[in-house]
Amino acid sequence: MILVLDCDNTLYPASTNLMALNDAGIAGYITNVLGIPPAEANKLRLEYLRKYGTTIAGLIAERNVNPDEFMDYVHSYDVDSLLKPNPRLREFLLVVNVPRIVFTSANRAHTEKVARAVGVHDCIDAIYDLKAVDYIGKPHPHAYEKILADFPGKRAVFVDDRMLNFPPARKLGMVNVWVDEGYQPPPSDITPALSVFHDETRSLVERSSDCVDFTIRRIEELADIWPQVVEKAKAK
Ligand SMILES: [Mg+2]
C-alpha cells in the first residue's frame, strides 16, 4: 500500500489561509510579469480555470510561460509564520510503515518548505510535484497514473481537500480521504471569478462527493481512522 497526500490545505489546516498568499502570487505574476492589468487578470484566470483546470496550465498553453519561473514566483512567500509543527501527524507518519508520498500541484521547493514547517519533512519518501507529472496536474488522470506506475501492484490511499480531485482516484481504485475543515476563506479579488467557476462545477462537485470514502477535519485524524482505511484498501 502507498499513502498519497496532497500538500496545500491538506498537510496544514485551510484556516491558516496560506492560499491567499498563493492567490496574491498568481495575480502578481500575471500583472507584474505579463503586464496584464488586475481586472483583466481575474478574467484570464477564470478563462484558464474553465478551459484547463488550473491557471498555470492556461499560462503554459497560451502565454508560453515558463512553468518553473512561474512556480518560483508564486511560491516565494514565507510559510513559517503561518504554519506550525504537527506532532500528531509526525507521530503517525513515522509509524505508518507504507511509502509516504506528497502529490501536489505546487512545486517541490514549496512542498519541502511546508513539510519542514509542519515538522514532517523527514517522513516523506517521495514528492510528485507538477513538474513530476509533466505539468498535467490533478484532477487529470495522467497525474495519478504516473504515480501508480511507479508503485506497481500497490493499493493507494489518497488524501486531499479538493472534492474535484477524487473521481479519477476512485476510478483507479484508490481509497479516498477528504480533509474538510469547513473553512470559508475571506473574500479576495479572485473570489467573484472563483464563485462563477464553482457555480459551473457545482454538479460535478456534488457527484464527486460519491467518491469520498472517509471524511476528516484535520490531517492528523488519519491516525484515528487508519485501521478502517487499511481494511477498505484491502477490500478494493
Ligand atoms: Mg489542496
Image (spheres, grey):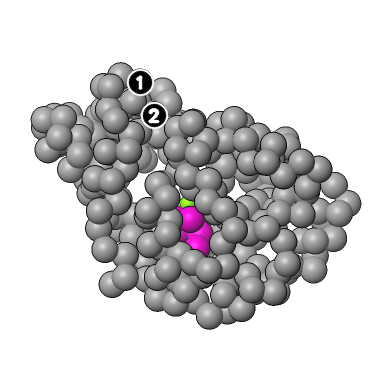
> Does the image show residue 206?
no
Instruction: Choose between 199 and 42: the one closer to the eye.
Output: 42
In the rendered image, which residue does mark 1 sit on? 61
Of all residues, the one furthest to the right in this rendering is: 235
Asked if ligand 1 lies within 8 A of label 1, the reply is no
Residue depicted at x 63% and y 59%:
100
Q: Amino acid at mark 2?
A: Ala
Q: Which residues are magenta?
A: 7-12
Check the image and report above or below for 61 versus 221. Answer: above
Check the image and report above or below for 107 versus 16. Answer: above
Q: Residues within 10 Å of mark 2 (few under 14, many from 20)?
A: some
Looking at the rendered structure, the secondary structure element under dot 2 is helix
Q: Magenta stretch: residue 11 in it? A: yes
**How far across and how far down the image is residue 131, in percent?**
45, 37
Total marks in image? 2
Name the quadrant containing residue 143: top right
Instruction: Choose between 37 and 233: the one closer to the eye.
Output: 233
Does the residue at mark 1 contact the one at mark 2 (Cβ under 8 Å)? yes
Q: Amino acid at mark 1?
A: Ala
In the rendered image, which residue does mark 2 sit on? 57
Looking at the rendered structure, the secondary structure element under dot 1 is helix
Check the image and report above or below for 132 versus 78. Answer: above
Instruction: Describe residue 19's horizontal placement relative to residue 96 as left or right.
Output: left
Residue depicted at x 68% and y 58%:
99
Residue depicted at x 80% and y 68%:
227
Instruction: Describe residue 61's horizontal placement relative to residue 188 as left or right.
Output: right
Q: Magenta stretch: residue 122 in it? A: no
Residue depicted at x 24% and y 45%:
73
Name the quadrant containing residue 123: bottom right
**How far across and how far down the image is residue 136, in percent?**
49, 31
Magenta segment main secondary structure: loop
**How far across and how far down the image is residue 183, in percent?**
43, 62
